[in-house]
Image (tube, grey):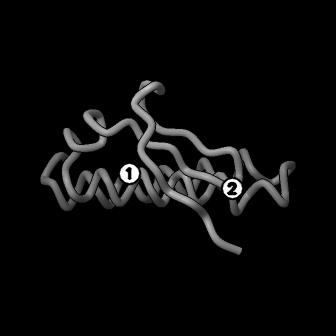
């Protein structure tokens, strides 16, 4: 399984259809390094959790919050 990642400035931020991750170039370049990593992890989680839609809300929400906490602490935004 592989994901294609490409830039698409016709979308406002980023999205995935399960096969591709689309990223708006100017928006992405305005993110910090940790925010970019967080975005990519978030999009990959969308793809990974597609196989188990009933678990998606709980699992993805908890993991997303955990990752956001780590990024805030790293950036000193506690």
Point 22% across, 43% down: residue: 29
Name the residue that disc number 1 marks.
68
Depth check: 40 or 17 in front? 17
Left or right of residue 23: residue 58: right
Mark 1 falls on what kind of element? helix
**Which residue: 46% across, 51% down?**
6
x and y percentages locating residue 77 in the rendered image? 17, 46
Question: Quick one: label 2, few (<14), some, or many (20+) residues within 10 Å?
Answer: few
Residue 11, label in figure:
none
Q: Nearer the viewer, mark 2 or mark 1?
A: 2
Cα gap from disc 2 to disc 1, whole angstroms: 24 Å
Tell me the quadrant of the picture where the N terminus can be found. Answer: bottom right
Please state which of residues 40 and 68 is positioned toward the viewer in this rendering.
40
Which residue is located at x 38 percent, y 51 percent?
68
Residue 38 shown left or right of residue 49 in the figure = left
The relative height of residue 15 versus residue 6 in the rendered view (above or below) is above
Q: Secondary structure at mark 2?
A: loop
Marks 2 and 1, the one that precedes in the sequence: 2
Of all residues, the one furthest to the bottom in this rendering is 1
Q: Is residue 61 above or below residue 51?
A: above
Q: Which residue is mark 2?
A: 19
Horizontal side, residue 62 vs residue 41: left or right: right
From the viewer's perspective, is residue 57 above or below residue 52?
above
User: Going 26% across and 58% down the picture, which residue do you hit?
Assistant: 34
């Amino acid at each position: 399984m592989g994901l294609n990642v490409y830039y698409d400035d016709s979308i406002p931020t980023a999205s995935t259809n399960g096969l591709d991750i689309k990223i708006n170039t100017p928006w992405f370049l305005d993110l910090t390094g940790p925010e970019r990593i967080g975005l990519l992890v978030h999009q990959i989680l969308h793809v990974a959790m597609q196989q188990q839609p009933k678990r998606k809300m709980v699992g993805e929400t908890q993991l997303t919050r955990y990752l956001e906490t780590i990024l805030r602490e790293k950036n000193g935004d506690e």
